[in-house]
Amino acid sequence: IPTFHGGPFDELISLLEFYSNSILLFQTNSYLFPQRVFFQVIKTSLVTIKLCEYQLRRCVEWRNSCRTLSDVGPQGDLGSPDLLQSLANSIATNCVGTIATFCSSVKK
């Protein structure tokens, strides 16, 4: 279930949560899938990490290029470091953490 806080990264965070749930579903039921799906999951995980890194880098670049955004309206500063922190936390938990757990379970 997606968690929305009204921030500019909510849709991306929801996708990361969906990705995490998908990996966990595959991990739990991997015996039901053909072996080739396992390799696709590994490739997709690598691409996902690269995309997350790219997105985070672009968000930081955008934020650094902006003037003070505190007077933009009722939502406040859309470039707030707090909002960027929620994206970084989601990447760490839902992407990197899930992939690390998946890889650890595969080693066993």
Image (cartoon, helix red, strand yellow):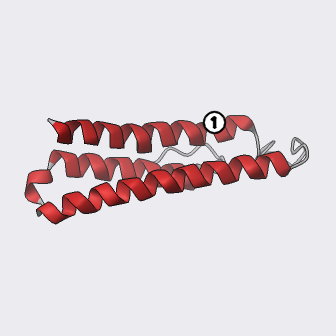
> Quarter of the image containing the C terminus?
top left
Q: Nearer the viewer, residue 30 or 104?
A: 104
Q: Nearer the viewer, residue 105 or 10?
A: 105
State left or right for residue 23 relative to residue 63.
left
Q: Is residue 11 above or below residue 94?
A: below
Q: Nearer the viewer, residue 10 or 75?
A: 10
Disc 1 is placed on an element classified as helix
Rendering coords of residue 37 (x, y %): 20, 63
Residue that lies at the very extreme toward the left in this rendered image:
31
Rendering coords of residue 67 (x, y %): 91, 47
Rendering coords of residue 18 (x, y %): 39, 52
Q: Residues within 10 Å of mark 1 (few under 14, many from 20)?
A: few
State left or right for residue 93 relative to residue 65.
left
Looking at the rendered structure, the kind of residue marked 1 is Gln
Seen at 23% across and 49% down, the residue is 25
Q: How many numbered badges does the structure rendering display?
A: 1
Rendering coords of residue 16 (x, y %): 45, 50
State left or right for residue 50 relative to residue 106.
right
Seen at 28% across and 57% down, the residue is 41
Q: Is residue 36 above or below residue 100?
A: below
Residue that lies at the very extreme toward the front in this rendered image:
107
The residue singled out by tag 1 in the image is 85
